[in-house]
Image (cartoon, helix red, strand yellow):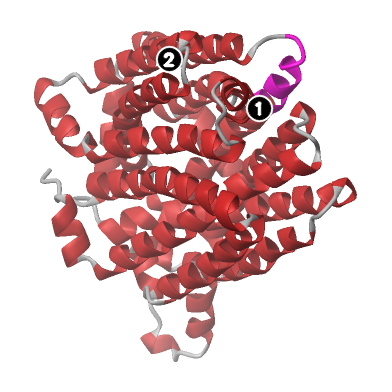
Amino acid sequence: MHSLTYGELIGGNRNFRNLLIGQFISELGNWFNFIAGLGLVRMVSDASPTAAGLFFVARLLPFALTSPIAGTFVDRFSRRQVMIWTDLLRAVIALSFLLVSDPGDLWIAYLATVLLHFFGAFFDGAKNAAAPNLAGKEGLLAATALLFSTRFLLMAIGSALGGWAAYAFGYKVAFIINAASFVVSAYTVWLIPEEATRDETTGARMSSLSLRRRRTPPSEQPNYVTPAERDPFLTELREGLVYTVKNHFAFTILIMNVIWATGGGSINVIFERLGGVYFAETEKWNPDVAVAMMWTATGFGLALGMLIARRASIYLDRKGINHWFIGWALIAHGVLFAAGGAAPTLWLFATIAFVSRAIVGVEYAVQETMFQRSLPDHIRGRISTLDRGAELTMFGLSSYISSELMYYITPQTLTVLSGILSAMAGVVWFVREKAEPSASAGGDVELGST
């Protein structure tokens, strides 16, 4: 199958271009919010590890626990409307951080963070389910790489700008920018036609089309599915769970991502304690700038990996070594990150983080494209959000456990443990593939049937 280049996809597909622009702007605001929110919690709580851990949990667990419900919701209703309304709601919520000024107000920061990521689960579920339809089969690899590379690029740029803005202008400016970014994102999604977010078959399940049917003479009605003919919400939710467990490839991806998150979740605490505390003291860095620098290196690394993923995927396809690459890339990136625990300076640690994340960026783009191609459109939202939700649940638990471990071990030791645990995802991949070597073929069969 011919794969579109980045230029061909962006230049020739206005709907996908609008989605990409919206994500670019909202992700920029999100990273302003993250750096400013973390700095605000650090300042108000006097750098308490527990307070930072609760902030990370508030970011991750609501998204994770809501994702399966959100996935079923966006398969059932208008993906476009879900994205628009969740953007507008998050714009209002983002401004509530302006009310936090002392330790007694920390609950506002936690609650606002919970709500931002609760609604974020619905937005991401709708976006991820709609993106393959907006890009088409030939544009899916480029679309996956672009959506994730721009997200990680904004991790880099947004972190750097957020750290600088917090240092130069204070935290309030960052929160206002975050709110404005959601409004702009909602406008770009509004420009996308409703019918472009689904294929012809599953588009029939949208509530708006069902309403249109009631106003159309029977002789002119297409074969739409009415709400009464649909399975109950919980039945569709269960359908997604059953598919994930019974489909070998989908279950492999879920297990692998959860294993990766046992180590990957520590990165929040590692960056906060190494940058915001350790290197801030030993090398006299501003805490916000030091933390932002680590996230900037990570973001640039992931973005670079995503951007070269298309050419890498073409080469891997030609050689027939996609599955080999996924396993070894995961192992290599984890081992390299573990080595960062011995880095004596912030600059060296940031360099190691950059290379490690570049490796996993290529791996993730290849893996995610294979995964998305294997999923039928009518169930894609449920499966992708279930996978993401399980991963982020472990990510959040790992973040909190890591924050509590800071009372007993050093950030450097935690870095080593994080890398080793993340590398185990590659081992799990090889074990699962060896157990059923035809799993990839099963995914290809499903791709042909979607």
What residue is shown at x 12% (from left), y 43% (from top)? Answer: 1
Reading the image, the residue beneath label 1 is 399
Q: Which residues are magenta?
A: 398-408
Is the Cβ of the residue at disc 1 closer than 8 Å to that at disc 2? no
The reply to whether residue 82 is in sight is: no
Where is residue 314 drawn, in percent x and y? 13, 33
| 353 versus 221 height, above or below | above
424 or 57: nearer the viewer: 57
**Image spot of residue 305 (x, y percent):** 28, 33
Q: Secondary structure at mark 2?
A: helix
Q: Observer-nearest residue: 203 or 401?
A: 401
Residue at numbered disc 2: 334
Position of 49 relative to 296 (above/below): above
Image-based side of 373 in relation to 421, left or right: left
Which residue is most to the front?
Answer: 284
Question: Within the magenta stretch, is there residue 333?
Answer: no
Distance in Å between CA atoms under marks 1 and 2? 17 Å
**Which of the 4 image quarters holds residue 219?**
bottom left
Query: Would you identify the image quadrant in which residue 56 lies?
Result: top right
Label 1 or label 2, whichever comes before in sequence order:
2
The percent coordinates of residue 142 (x first, y second) are 23, 47
Looking at the rendered structure, the kind of residue marked 1 is Ser
Q: Residue at x 40, y 42 (%)?
A: 152
* Kind of element beneath mark 1: helix
Instruction: Please state if 312 lies on the left or on the right of 107 as rendered.
Output: left
- Local packing at callout 1 (Cα closer than 10 Å; few below 14, some 14-19, many 20+) is many
